[in-house]
Amino acid sequence: MKKICLVIPYFGKFNNYYHLWMESAKCNKTVDFHIYTDQQIEGFANIKVHQTTLSEISDLAVRKLSKISEDNNIHNINWGGVNSPYKLCDYKPAYGLIFDEDLQDYDFWGHCDVDLIFGDIRKFITDDILNKYDRILSRGHFSLYRNNKETNLTFLLSHNNNA
């Protein structure tokens, strides 16, 4: 079975219905969730909680994205950092690079919103589907990406004049 991890940076107080999301995530035992947050929340077998700050995530993003831009000879991007939790939405396609150290054991990584209530994810996102596509679902509330260098750097294509 292909290994899937969903990345969720979330700063500030969770909504009052967060516990419903958490219960639905816990039921998807073959999908891991990595939550990066400044809140004190409980982790579970498939839900890993990383205590951090928005500033630390911003610094990580700038460091990783500046390095990859330099390595790929891309000089027209100013990675200004994340100055508000909502700004994290702009960085979603780059999570595979930003959080690469936590994602190295996964075949797919993705992101999701914490206002979703999941059914059985594996009933719909089967290994047959994962074998066919590099990106699954495109609206941003729930998206998956094949965890390889080519796919993880796709977000740079529109910025690289050589691509």
Image (tube, helix red, strand yellow):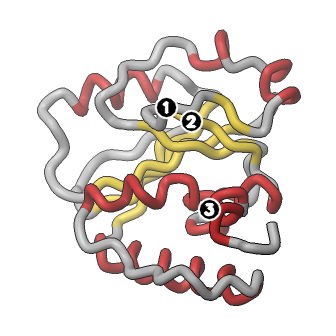
Query: Of residues 136 and 75, which is closer to you in this image?
Result: 75
Q: CA distance from mark 1 to mark 2?
A: 7 Å
Does 13 sit left or right of 160 as displayed? left
Q: Where does residue 76 sit, x and y in percent of width and height? A: 57, 83
Q: Which residue is mark 1?
A: 139
Pick the quarter of the image with the C terminus: bottom right
Question: Badge 1: how crowded within 10 Å, few (<14), some, or many (20+)?
Answer: few
Does 55 sit left or right of 26 as displayed? left
Give whichever of discs 2 and 3 has the lower sequence position.
Answer: 3
Give whichever of discs 1 and 3 has the lower sequence position.
Answer: 3
| Mark 1 vs 3: CB contact within 8 A | no
**Quarter-of-image position of residue 152:** bottom right
Q: CA distance from mark 2 to mark 3?
A: 18 Å
SS for tag 3?
helix
Q: Is residue 70 above or below residue 96?
A: below
At x 33%, y 72%, the residue is: 82
Dot 2 amino acid type = Ser
Does 91 sit left or right of 89 as displayed? right
Q: Is residue 126 above or below residue 43?
A: above
Dot 3 amino acid type = Asp
At x 30%, y 71%, the residue is: 54
Q: Is residue 30 above or below residue 158?
A: above
| Mark 1 vs 2: CB contact within 8 A | yes
Q: Which residue is mark 3?
A: 102
Q: Which residue is mark 2?
A: 143
At x 62%, y 88%, the residue is: 75
| Mark 2 vs 3: CB contact within 8 A | no
Front of the two marks 1 and 2: 1
Q: CA distance from mark 1 to mark 3?
A: 24 Å
| Mark seen at residue 95 | none
Query: Of residues 113 and 16, which is closer to you in this image?
Result: 113
SS for tag 2?
strand
